[in-house]
Amino acid sequence: MKRLLLITTGLALIAPDIALAQQQQQDQQHHRPPAGTTRPAPAPAPAPGRPPHAGGPDHGHGPPPHQGGQQPRPPRPGGPSIQPIRPPGGGHDRPPPRPQPQPPRPRPPEHRPGTGRPPNFRPIHGPVYRYPHGYRYRRWTIGLFLPSVFFSSYYYYDGWGPLGVGAPPPGYRWVRYGPDLLLVQIGTRRIVDVIYGAFY
């Protein structure tokens, strides 16, 4: 009698556990949560053509708030808009025109030392000539050396064009001495040509 009572009591204690284990096994087979637990509701599918909001489901409350607590304002209709700056000429970047090189000016023909009066020579009326102190007119000849007092802008003569003579070669200068015109080498002061009666 006592043994039967113990068996009956043991079965009464084990029966709920066996029933709970069978129910969990059936729930796992049918993908149902066990009794006494709640299953989270599935997230609603996003609306077509609208991406879900990053960080959580889209609840239809508009775009996420702007960082800093303020939302950007949409541009006003008809307001000023920034236009790209277009260069003149239809928007094409054209390089500036290159400056055309100027043709070199023709240098007048040079007077060759020792040739004397050229064929187109013509004397001209010159301004009053003043000799340096202690000098007077003398007839210079080729090969002599002109004193250094005559190597200054007062005695240099650059208006040789109307006389019909050529330009002095590099390193030479025309020097006026009274009515005559002397071609003198600057470095040596040597007279290399004389045109007598160039001025009247």
Image (spheres, grey):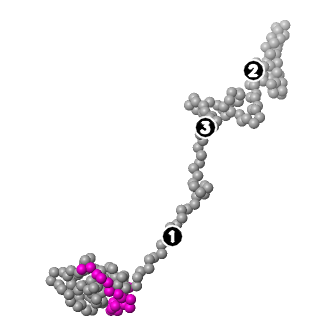
SS under mark 2: loop
In this rendering, position of residue 140 left or right of residue 92 = left
**Label located before the other in sequence (2 or 3):** 2
Instruction: Tell me the magenta residue range.
Output: 110-128
Distance between the Cα atoms at labels 2 and 3?
A: 59 Å
Q: Nearer the viewer, residue 15 or 114?
A: 114
Location of mark 2 (residue): 37
Location of mark 3 (residue): 79
Label annotation for residue 100: 1
* Three-letter code, disc 3: Gly
The answer to which quarter of the image holds residue 87 is bottom right
Distance between the Cα atoms at labels 2 and 1?
A: 94 Å
Toward the left, the furthest residue is 134
SS under mark 1: loop
Q: Nearer the viewer, mark 2 or mark 3?
A: 3
Distance between the Cα atoms at labels 1 and 3?
A: 48 Å
* Three-letter code, disc 1: Gln
Q: Nearer the viewer, residue 179 or 177?
A: 179
* Three-letter code, disc 2: Thr
Q: Quadrant of the N terminus?
A: top right
Q: Is residue 160 visible?
A: yes
Q: Is residue 18 visible?
A: no
Q: Residue at x 36, y 82 (%)?
A: 162
Q: Residue at x 60, y 41 (%)?
A: 81
Q: Quadrant of the C terminus?
A: bottom left
